[in-house]
Image: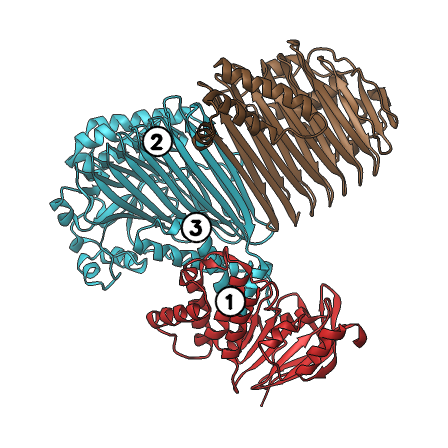
Amino acid sequence: MAHVNLELPAAAAPPKWFGTVTEQSLNQQLNGALNHKMHRERWKYTRVPPVLALLKEPGAPFETQLPEGVTLRHVAHDSMDTPAQVFFGEALAETLQHAPEATAWLCYQPNVQVLDVEAEVSEPLILKGAALHQPLIIRLAANASLDLHEIYDGNEGSSQLQSIWIDMQPGSRVQHSRNSFTTGTHWQYLRVNIGRDATYHLHNHSAGAELRRQDMQLICAAPGAHAEVTSAAFIGSKTHLDQQITVEHRAAHTTSEQTFHNIAAGGAKVTFNGRIHIHEHCASVDANLSNKNLSLGDNAVINTKPELEIYTDDVKCSHGATVGSLDQDHLFYCASRGIAPQQARTLLSQAFLQVCTLGPLAESAQQFLQQQAQSEVEGG
Amino acid sequence: MSESVDDLVQTNAEYNAGFVTDIESETLPPGLDESVVRFISQKKKEPEWLTEWRLKAYATWQEMTAPEWAHVHFPPVDFEAISYYSAPKSQADGPQSLDEVDPELLRTYEKLGIPLHEQEALAGVVKPSANVAVDAVFDSVSIATTFKDKLAEAGVVFCPISEAVHSHPELVQKYMGSVVPQKDNFYAALNSAVFSDGSFVYIPKGVRCPMELSTYFRINERNTGQFERTLIVADEGSHVSYLEGCTAPMRDENQLHAAVVELVALGDAEIKYSTVQNWYPGDEEGRGGIYNFVTKRGLCAGPRAKISWTQVETGSAITWKYPSVVLRGDDSVGEFYSVALTGKVQQADTGTKMIHMGRNTKSTIISKGISTGRSQNTYRGLVRISPTAAGARNFTQCDSLLIGDSCGAHTFPYIEDSNVSAVIEHEATTSKVSEDQLFLCQQRGIDPEKAVSMIVNGFCKEVFKELPMEFAVEAGKLMEVSLEGAVG
Amino acid sequence: MTLLDVKDLYAEVAQQQILKGLNLKVNAGEVHAIMGPNGSGKSTLANVLAGRPGYDVTAGDVVFEGHSIVDWEAHDRAHAGVFLAFQYPVEIPGVSNMEFLKASIDSKAFANDEAQPAAAGFIKEVRKLAQSLDLNPEFLKRGVNEGFSGGEKKRNEVLQLLLLQPRLAVLDETDSGLDIDALQVVAEGVNRFRSDDNGVVLITHYQRLLEYIVPDFVHVLADGRIVQSGDKSLALELEEKGYAWLT
């Protein structure tokens, strides 16, 4: 199939901390990665140009109140103290291959925000505001912990972008909650490097938008690393959500658990691509993924692709995906107990999302998602 | 004291079908241009429309580029180094009666356990209980078709496609390319241009084919490609079960096998298509072996039609095939049952596509992949529910078994749903043959090699039970032989 | 006649020394109970006797009917007549019980140059045995131990014991996790197996089983060695006093 060659806006001089890479080579690699067949596969069901267009805009810093134990600095590229290879935990070329757009965004901005967490932080760190945010780098020291909240709500139609890179040293913990309920074009990139015996947990709650694309790359980089994701989304009439998640097991004795529940209303389009990648010689890995989709209205389009890529035998791995509408038996059971069909549909839809609505932002997320489900069922 | 699973995955068993038949052949020099296409067409004394059809395919092919696949790695195929026509000399003019078939050829098939002598098959000399009509394709041509008379009584047409072009031109012209168009993909286009032979089956309205039909493919000549084309048409309310088997000699170079299989099931008809693929897989270092790039697709054209693919894949250096079903008729049913076993440095990228278009269409996919050695085994599948397919259902179960820590097992299932009333379920698991299972077997006196083969057979049971009886036994044996390769 | 002679046996698992100079002699017609606290090496002994990979004999010898078998593979020992009833029988999905039993008995017959039993008679015999052990014959069609309850798995082990008729049966905590009814069925099976020609090594943590299978000898295993031997009264003493006084 012939395709248009995609092009990123040309980068300025590569940031110093990227090492010896030349401007030409960086741009070549970025565009090569962007047009690579594996990467285009990730954009099979969503148009990439609106997202690329965002990358040309200037970014703004996050507005936040810092809890105690956390420092936030705006660092010019020249002053970054960690070489990219050390920070990414892999060769730059590999990072480029996995995330050309996010790496480009990292290069194009004059500075990055660096958030250092040195200890156990009890108060949550709250990130808010609909904007194109400068790249945020979060570094957790050994045994540090962070409760991270991202809240994007209201009926703001403006474009948004977040690219968050988290590096977790041994024994650290992150509980990450994210409510993404705005209606404009929104691209969210998230990458987490999970160190030895570190635990990362994402509670992801989303609504459909004009275009919402969530790229997540979780890397279990050392023994004992554990990644967990629970995600619930309601994709309302004629809105769009595209979730791409890769969990990589790069070390033995690592575990991951992912559950995604999505409801698509009439005319909605939802795409889910979940990939579990277990590298060679990584024994005793336990990795599971479940993606369930409920289709509520006509002309909804649901694309799902749970993938396994496994290069060693001593693993326990499973994935499952279902697509369907509300269970007739459940509806009938409700009816036999006197619950009207419409109410039953609302109840069952809400329950379907509720099991994946967890963490500190669960209450506000539930409120929002339940109301969406209710108005969809009753409005339709 | 005793081997662990890892230790067992060492040496190499023999490929039992790896011998070469010494027979004089008429073989075209390597290379492909329009004159080669015309030569093949002329050799078969084809009507003009077919020559044109081939030339159109050739023109299309020339404009296409060879596909690259994300998870399959091999050097580019040199299409100029392949000979596109090879036939045993005595057979150059097409199949004759069995008595006239070169005895050397009959011995080849006998060695492979394929009964071409009807009397012997019936008397149970070669293969007890086998009541199977066989079309044997040797390199580029069909050399013998058995039980023609008995089938004719039932009105069933089973003959080489080169013969059907003359005896049933209206059927061939109507259906050939109707399921897999010439321009469908690179290898399908190539096949459409240069296909040499293959089998043709027509089951008339309401007829239940009285016996299993089967085609046996054998590549013998060096540097040849095999481009057979199979077309099966099951008219309304008819039923047929069909099996293909494949082998090739052990050779150092890679050989290309690019077949096209088209199935058409009209209303209430049922086609069951089973494959046991045992092409030469290459040696321990990946030298030689068949590139098996095959397009197989069935069309459920009418209501309540059913197409069922069952495949047992143990051979080939690279397998790239996705036997698919287009479910156009309302209430039609598509099934795909697959066992793919890879060893050495084999690569298998196989799966299915279920395209739901009609209302209340149903599909089932059961795929079992076993990876050993340094092989890579990929399931790739697509379940697409079109907006018109109200009430469609799919169930997919995809299991991988890994033996040894240097092999890979991958699952890429695409699910695309555009109808609110569809129900789709997909499950996949990965496991290994555990040391505990092996030890339990050993403690009960079953040696490790037999134990692994038992465990793998158990793992594949859901698929094997879909095979016709005789072939289920064959498949079990083939797995055992192939695993010896993995288990030493 | 001496069936089994374990001589000053040292064995390790994952480079950890578990058995440290163990001696045990079992004659035909005898039932030996091996008791001991958790971690004393009871299960290791069972697995070493059966030749489980990963259990390495570092010194000493295991002599079975006059042959040193420490270098034999597990299936060769099985063919010679060593049977281990597992504490946690593993599941083998898709391989039916009947198929598994036939493969087992055929392998043994083949190795010993005996005739393999005809399928029809064999199936009948197995079904009869299953019934006598309160196992629904339908289980025979299911995968080996697949979806069996704990009790069913143990009864399945006893079924195999009775079918294979080994010379030496090693029962590794066969009583664990059984309710009293199941325990009686299992014990009855083992008692049926007992004869003057074979021997039984009964590994158990509790005295309870020994009320149903009366042993000729009771040994106490502690820290990889047998520290005390006696008759069945020793078991009662252990029940009363625990293991602490011995070590």
Q: Colour of chain B?
A: cyan
Quarter assignment of residue C174: bottom right
3 or 2: tag closer to the N-terminus = 3
Same chain for mark 3 and mark 1? The answer is no
Q: Which residue is mark 3?
A: B314
Q: Colour of chain C?
A: red
Tell me if B3 is positioned left or right of B354 in this view. Answer: right
**Kind of residue at badge 1:** Arg
Q: Which chain does tag 1 point to?
A: C
> For the residues marked 3 and 2, what is the alpha-carbon distance in whole angstroms?
31 Å
Depth check: C37 or C40 in front? C37
**Kind of residue at badge 3:** Thr
| Figure chain in brown | A
Q: Which residue is mark 1?
A: C155
Q: Which chain does tag 2 point to?
A: B
Measuring 39% from the left and 71% from the top, which residue is drawn there? C128
Measuring 52% from the left and 60% from the top, which residue is drawn there? B487
Q: How is the image coloured?
A: by chain
Residue B203 position within the rendered picture, expressed as x and y whole percent measured from the top left: 19, 39
User: Height in image: B164 above or below B5?
Assistant: above
Q: Secondary structure at mark 3?
A: loop
> For the residues marked 3 and 1, what is the alpha-carbon distance in whole angstroms?
38 Å
Query: Few, some or many C-alpha atoms within 10 Å of disc 2 (few <14, some 14-19, many ≥20)?
Result: many
Quarter assignment of residue C74: bottom right
**Kind of residue at badge 2:** Thr
Q: Secondary structure at mark 1?
A: helix
Depth check: A341 or A10 in front? A341
Q: Secondary structure at mark 2?
A: loop
